[in-house]
Image: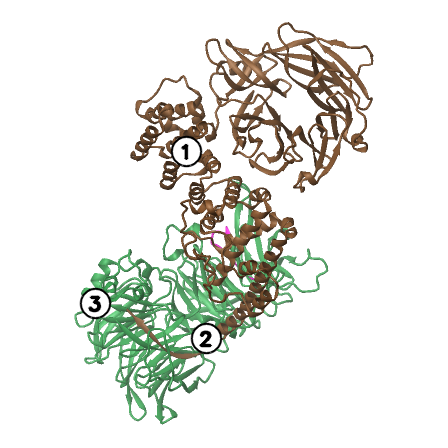
Chain colours: A green, B brown
């Protein structure tokens, strides 16, 4: 097939922010996650845990607690003192209300999702009513000294348990009075340290479960105020706790990175008496596990090491499948890198700045695996800092490299970059059209003549770029049937004829740019689209879904191609379907129309449509086998998927020209060195 | 209920077996620890066995010309062994002693009949004249006068007990058909003499006794096939001379018409005795068997036929019976539970049903039995537990004609001429794979070997070689084969056996080694031996001393060479030290390589290896040193050729040999030179490898630095996708 010159880039210094809190949608298939930088992400269980929505953070908006309420509404509260409701269709903070109690440490919704309770710095617990279009302050409950670090409603909604320092309180919601105070360090002799109750859960049986900074998970009878059981799980703090919906399993996370499961098990086989037993320990994290969640089939934990770990409970699994596999997500399921192929530039998107790099070059050639000597080093051309507290939603560099665009929640910026010899000058394009922001995705046309801006309600704006540095709003496309969801992926054809868009409803619309009209809709497939691209020669739209299916749709013919039908008939290889990270980028080789270049975090694949598809009996990753075979024997072993796993974790891969690739890696070790030191633990033999 | 359980062979007693040397056993005594027994043969040797491991732990012999006259016993307090040879010479030694010539010796003034060792009391010595001394008393003055108390009576049997912490000795004597019993209480120094009640037409054959409630119960096996009980009270103050002891019939050894002619018997528990004897039914030829009888209900509990014959001796320790069966010492475990009438009666009914053994003892495949086993050939190998059953069911008429053929053939050929026999057997071997072919071959070989044994001139060398070379045999399938080959000094067959058998006992491996080392080179040169293991590294024409080999590269340095030159070695030893010339001829080397290649366990080989004569040990060590130097010449430390010994095998044997002959090596002058050059060579190697270690450390560090360099932030690499 051929040799590629691979530019292996490891200078993208992305450090994903740690996970601060998690919230499983009650009886829903979604998980909300907040990071320490205020970013809120939504993962869809049904779409193979695809990260379907991201609401970028805001410097002033830390998130300490997330709550699903009133069905699918998501609320966040943080040390800023505000309760924020997120607009999940427009992917932004919709409205905020001051809690009036100083920094908010905790928030909990009642069983029906009609009321929110917040625990504040001043020791007060405040009730808010969830009303259409926002929340309303209801009343203050009994205020005592000491910040309220955690809250939990009794499932009946009559009482709230609140954890503070050294103490837990149970408050009667109707009277607002504290009906029970329990000193949690009463049993510990001569303790000088204060005991912080990090997390609390109120079970319907009346048992209050607490986890504290002494490393204990304790079960209390709230009525009598007595300790029922105490399990010391760690020498350091137990930071987080979550209970399963039917209250027979608890997951806790500790500051050593370990998580433990507790299960309510009969004392003897068949006995009615049950006790909480610590059953499974897991060590998936290296740092504090600040957040845990318990879905119906999995234990979910998020740590300061930025990892989201989904550990399925095998006893809840009916069959071996995608759900039954341990998943670890560190990187976002979307691309943060854009590439100017012609100019050989890379644009890296950080939370509040962009970096523009020029790739190096070599004039040597070599054999497989050789590292070629560089004749020019890569060059960091520009760092663009976003002004203001808002984080960047999206960014893009034009194929010629002379335009850079990015958007935040409220602002859209377009820059003209000029290269004079070794020098670079960057100039902001004034008077950009006033669009309804934010933009969720930006895409330059391949001739760098226009910019497509993905917007809310399924709309796409087309901006015409003007030399020497201007732009005008040309047109806005809207789906004919209307949509409430924002567009999150764009693809334009090389000939400038077609534009494909995907919104949060996963419907793919294709627009005709010549006639400025809606061309067609790709038949809906009930899974999230993770990447799409239009073939430069055939104008076939290649679509990758989060269940790892691949489709090829002919735009001119408005139907799936014959190859796509073959793929669906034969089915993809089992090993391909069992991969756990989504395809995040698709590219093509114009010189080889049958090739499709795909990548996810762990592999890079060239899909050769001219070769037979592998069946389940053949080896999917067969490159190393092929390399050992003589030329004649190779022919029989060839199949369509040519997979390379040399580059990991792979954030971005693209084809620069016919046989030149760029791979952007972010080694996990490089991230680890950026993180604060984890709690020192004595390990045997060290 | 009493039952005999599985049996196994503790050791062979044949000429090849190592113990007894054909003379039979003198006695078996408990060893210093549980599960150990001391075996004394009617010759010069005593052997300590660990019973559960079936392995000898130590072996001691007196000098040629001396003979052990009294069973070796163990002093349980000091863990010393006590033996008497030539009636009067007392020897006492410990486990670590090797040579009995160098251990404590005391010559006594009277002949010793037996020494009895008591678990909690010192050993007691009974002299032939009836005098009794504790060993301690005796050792204070070995030449003290021993009184003769029994005038011209002859001691037939003796036994010792501990009664109230003091030893009690009982012995029986005979004079002119009259039997007397003496009871000696050492504490009181009192001796009681009793006369056994006369029995018409029969006399006691054997005695056994136990003590309970201050009463000695003496059981006598009489020649009229009955066991009588005699009670002797210990506390008796009457000084009456020659009390007559009345006896009562305990048991009549007859069952449903057949009578057991007992030869020896032991007490199993309060209700059971075991009798070894021959069972003779009217009109049938008698057969030897081991029986357990219930004395309470006078019933036969269990019976085991011993078709190969016994020596008539039976011992019982720790729930095991020991007796010679054919040419081996067999151990049978037994179970004895409290008897009940139902069980006792129930057993009597099916006493014809033989016991069941989960093991097949290949040694028991005697001539006539072979036929029977072959009749039931298919079940022998597949269901070995039923093998014994079928074997002893010789009256079973269910004979299948086609399976009978091999057995019958062998039986028919028993008396055929040598050529006819070999032709027939060859035909048999060429037949297609029958079921249990392996077992059949075992039988064929056993048949051949038995023929060899009976006819010393007969030895089908080529035929045996052919079988061993073409079939996957094992030692356990034909245990006597190697013994016979050793006897005939058929070194080629031994070589092939060593190469092919996976389970050769260390004893035999040692015997092979000894034979190989002792055979003269001249004799070997005339013999066809497989040389493939040596041909690649030994200069066959080692007389041509002008052939200069290259300098040893690995482990040798100039300083060492210098060392060797400086030392005034004789030319011969210098050449040896250089490792240039093989100290043995190629034939012998090939044979020794076969020994080096065989599997062994240090623990079991070491005691045998100690017996290797010093000169042979030095020769062997010299050869091992030669091999070691040869190995070290190559960087991969392997010798070329097929089945050549590996460096690990060489090193293991070298260590083992040095362990076994440490003292010898220290003493012998020629060994001294060898050892010193060996030491120099090893020291040089150790230095060399420690240098290599240092290099390895540096290289690893360099490698690590290389890796670090790899982790740069940008590179352009070539990737090929196929």
Q: Which residue is mark 2?
A: A57
Which residue occupies 41% across, 25% down?
B370
Q: Which residue is mark 3?
A: A610
**Do callouts 1 and 2 point to residues on the same chain?**
no
Q: Secondary structure at mark 3?
A: loop
* Alpha carbon separation for disc pair 3 and 2: 45 Å
**Which residue is at the far top?**
B200
Q: Is residue A97 visible?
A: no
Q: Chain of mark 3?
A: A
Q: Nearer the viewer, residue A622 or B173?
A: B173
Residue B13 rendering spot, x and y as whole percentages: 54, 30
Image quadrant for the N terminus of chain B? top right
The image quarter in which residue B190 lies: top right
Q: Chain of mark 2?
A: A
**Which mark's residue is nearer the viewer, 3 or 1?**
1
* Alpha carbon separation for disc pair 3 and 1: 76 Å
Residue B31 rendering spot, x and y as whole percentages: 65, 33
- Residue range highlighted in magenta: A239-249
């Amino acid at each position: 097939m051929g040799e590629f010159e691979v530019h292996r880039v490891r200078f993208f210094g992305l450090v994903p922010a740690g996970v601060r809190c998690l919230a499983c949608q009650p009886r829903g298939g979604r998980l909300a996650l907040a990071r320490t930088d205020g970013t809120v992400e939504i993962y869809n269980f049904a779409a193979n845990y695809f990260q379907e929505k991201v609401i970028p953070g805001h410097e002033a908006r830390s998130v300490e607690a997330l709550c699903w309420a009133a069905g699918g509404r998501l609320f966040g509260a943080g040390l800023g003192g505000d309760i924020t409701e997120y607009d999940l269709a427009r992917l932004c903070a919709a409205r905020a209300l001051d809690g009036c109690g100083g920094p908010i440490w905790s928030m909990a919704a009642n069983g029906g999702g009609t009321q929110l309770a917040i625990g504040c710095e001043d020791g007060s617990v405040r009730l808010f009513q969830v009303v259409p279009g926002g929340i309303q302050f209801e009343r203050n409950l009994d205020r005592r000294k000491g910040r309220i670090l955690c809250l939990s409603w009794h499932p009946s909604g009559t009482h709230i348990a609140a954890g503070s320092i050294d103490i837990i309180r149970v408050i009667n919601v109707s009277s607002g009075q504290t009906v029970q105070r329990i000193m949690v360090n009463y049993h510990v002799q001569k303790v000088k340290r204060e005991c912080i109750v990090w997390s609390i859960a109120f079970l319907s049986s009346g048992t209050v479960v607490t986890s504290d900074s002494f490393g204990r998970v304790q079960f209390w009878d709230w009525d009598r105020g007595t300790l029922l059981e105490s399990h010391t799980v760690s020498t350091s703090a137990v930071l987080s706790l979550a209970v399963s919906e039917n209250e027979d399993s608890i997951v806790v996370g500790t500051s050593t990175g370990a998580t433990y499961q507790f299960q309510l098990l009969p004392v003897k086989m068949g006995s009615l008496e049950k006790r909480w037993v610590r059953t499974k320990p897991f060590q998936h994290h290296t740092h504090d596990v600040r957040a845990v969640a318990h879905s119906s089939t999995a234990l979910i934990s998020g740590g300061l090491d930025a990892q989201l770990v989904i550990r399925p409970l095998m006893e809840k699994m009916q069959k071996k499948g995608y759900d039954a596999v341990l998943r670890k997500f560190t990187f976002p399921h979307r691309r943060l890198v854009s590439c100017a192929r012609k100019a050989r530039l890379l644009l890296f998107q950080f939370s509040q700045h962009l970096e523009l790099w020029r790739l190096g070059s070599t004039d040597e050639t070599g054999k497989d695996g050789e590292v070629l000597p560089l004749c020019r080093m890569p060059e960091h051309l520009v760092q663009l800092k976003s002004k203001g507290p808002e984080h960047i939603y999206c960014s893009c560099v034009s194929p010629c490299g002379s335009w850079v665009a990015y958007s935040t929640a409220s602002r859209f910026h377009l820059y003209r970059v000029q290269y004079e010899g070794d020098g670079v000058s960057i100039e902001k394009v004034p008077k950009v059209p006033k669009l309804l922001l934010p933009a969720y995705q930006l895409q330059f046309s391949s001739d760098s003549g226009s910019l497509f801006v993905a917007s809310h309600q399924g709309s796409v704006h087309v901006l015409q770029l003007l030399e020497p540095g201007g732009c005008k709003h040309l047109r806005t496309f809207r789906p004919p049937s209307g949509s409430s969801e924002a567009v999150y992926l764009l693809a334009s054809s090389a000939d400038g004829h077609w534009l494909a868009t995907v919104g949060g409803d996963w419907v793919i619309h294709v627009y005709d740019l010549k006639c400025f009209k809606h061309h067609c809709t790709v038949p809906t497939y009930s899974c999230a689209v993770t990447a799409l691209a239009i073939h430069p020669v055939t104008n076939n739209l290649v679509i990758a879904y989060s269940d790892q299916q691949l489709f090829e749709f002919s735009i001119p013919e408005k139907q799936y191609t014959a190859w796509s039908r073959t793929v669906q008939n034969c089915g993809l290889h089992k090993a391909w379907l069992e991969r756990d990270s989504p395809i995040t980028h698709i590219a093509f080789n114009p010189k080889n129309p049958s090739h499709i270049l795909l990548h996810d975090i762990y592999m890079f694949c060239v899909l050769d449509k001219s070769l037979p598809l592998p069946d389940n009996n053949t080896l999917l990753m067969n490159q190393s086998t092929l390399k050992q075979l003589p030329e004649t024997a190779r022919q029989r072993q060839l199949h369509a998927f040519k997979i390379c796993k040399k580059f990991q974790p792979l954030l971005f891969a693209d084809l620069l020209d016919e046989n030149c690739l760029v791979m952007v890696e972010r080694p996990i070790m490089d991230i680890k060195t950026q993180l604060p030191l984890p709690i020192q633990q004595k390990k045997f033999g060290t | 209920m009493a039952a005999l359980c599985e049996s196994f062979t503790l050791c062979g007693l044949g000429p090849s077996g190592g113990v007894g040397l054909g003379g039979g056993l003198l006695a078996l005594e408990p060893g210093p620890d549980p599960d150990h027994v001391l075996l004394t043969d009617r010759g010069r040797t005593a052997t300590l066995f660990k019973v559960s491991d079936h392995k000898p732990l130590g072996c001691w012999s007196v000098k040629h010309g001396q003979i052990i006259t009294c069973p070796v016993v163990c002093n349980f307090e000091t863990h010393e062994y006590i033996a008497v040879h030539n009636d009067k010479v007392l020897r006492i030694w410990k486990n670590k002693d090797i040579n009995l010539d160098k251990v404590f010796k005391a010559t006594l003034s009277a002949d010793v009949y037996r020494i009895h060792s008591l678990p909690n009391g010192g050993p007691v010595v009974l002299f032939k004249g009836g005098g009794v001394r504790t060993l301690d008393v005796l050792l204070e003055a070995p030449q003290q006068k021993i009184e003769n108390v029994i005038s011209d009576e002859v001691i037939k049997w003796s036994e010792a007990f501990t009664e109230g912490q003091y030893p009690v000795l009982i012995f029986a004597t005979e004079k002119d058909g009259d039997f007397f019993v003496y009871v000696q209480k050492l504490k009181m120094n009192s001796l009681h003499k009793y006369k056994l009640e006369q029995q018409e037409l029969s006399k006691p054959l054997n005695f056994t006794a136990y003590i309970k409630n201050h009463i000695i119960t003496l059981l006598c096996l009489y020649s009229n096939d009955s066991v009588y009980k005699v009670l002797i009270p210990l506390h008796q103050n009457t000084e009456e001379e020659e009390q007559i002891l009345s006896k009562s019939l305990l048991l009549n050894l007859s069952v449903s018409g057949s009578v057991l002619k007992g030869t020896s018997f032991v007490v199993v528990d309060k209700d059971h005795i075991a009798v070894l004897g021959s069972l003779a039914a009217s009109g049938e030829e008698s057969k030897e068997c081991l029986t357990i009888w219930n004395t309470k209900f006078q019933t036969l509990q269990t019976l085991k036929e011993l078709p190969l014959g016994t020596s008539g001796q039976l011992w019982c320790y720790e729930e095991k019976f020991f007796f010679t069966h054919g040419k081996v010492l067999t151990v049978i475990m037994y179970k004895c539970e409290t008897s009940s009438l139902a069980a006792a009666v129930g057993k009597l009914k099916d006493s014809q049903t033989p016991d069941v053994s989960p093991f097949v003892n290949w040694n028991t495949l005697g001539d006539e039995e072979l036929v029977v086993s072959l009749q039931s050939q298919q079940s022998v190998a597949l269901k070995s537990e039923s093998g014994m059953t079928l074997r002893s069911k010789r009256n079973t008429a269910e004979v299948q004609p086609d399976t009978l053929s091999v057995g019958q053939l062998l039986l028919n050929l028993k008396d055929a001429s040598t050529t006819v026999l070999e032709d027939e057997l060859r035909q048999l071997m060429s037949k297609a794979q029958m079921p249990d072919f392996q077992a059949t071959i075992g039988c064929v070989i056993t048949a051949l070997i038995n023929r060899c044994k009976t006819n010393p001139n007969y030895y089908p060398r080529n035929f045996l070689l052919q079988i061993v070379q073409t079939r996957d045999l094992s030692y356990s399938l034909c245990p006597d084969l190697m013994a016979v080959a050793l006897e005939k000094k058929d070194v080629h067959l031994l070589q092939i056996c060593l190469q092919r058998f996976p389970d050769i006992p260390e004893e035999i491996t040692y015997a092979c080694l000894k034979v190989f080392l002792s055979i003269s080179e001249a004799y070997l040169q005339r013999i066809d031996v497989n040389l493939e293991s040596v041909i690649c590294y030994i200069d066959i024409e080692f007389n041509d001393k002008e052939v200069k080999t290259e300098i040893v590269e690995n482990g040798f340095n100039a300083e060492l060479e210098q060392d060797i030159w400086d030392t005034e070695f004789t030319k011969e030893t210098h050449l040896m030290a250089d490792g240039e010339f093989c100290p043995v001829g190629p034939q012998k080397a090939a044979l020794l390589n076969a020994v080096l290649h065989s599997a062994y366990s240090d623990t079991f080989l070491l005691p045998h290896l100690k017996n290797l004569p010093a000169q042979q040990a030095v020769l062997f060590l010299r050869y091992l040193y030669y091999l070691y130097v040869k190995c070290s010449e190559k960087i991969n430390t392997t010798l070329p050729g097929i089945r050549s010994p590996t460096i690990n095998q060489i090193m293991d044997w070298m260590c083992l040999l040095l362990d076994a002959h440490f003292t010898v090596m220290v003493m012998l002058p020629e060994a001294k030179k060898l050892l010193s050059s060996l030491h120099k060579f090893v020291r040089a190697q150790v230095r060399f490898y420690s240098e290599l270690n240092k290099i390895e450390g540096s290289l690893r560090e360099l490698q690590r630095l290389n890796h670090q360099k790899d982790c740069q932030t940008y590179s352009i690499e070539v990737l090929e996708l196929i």
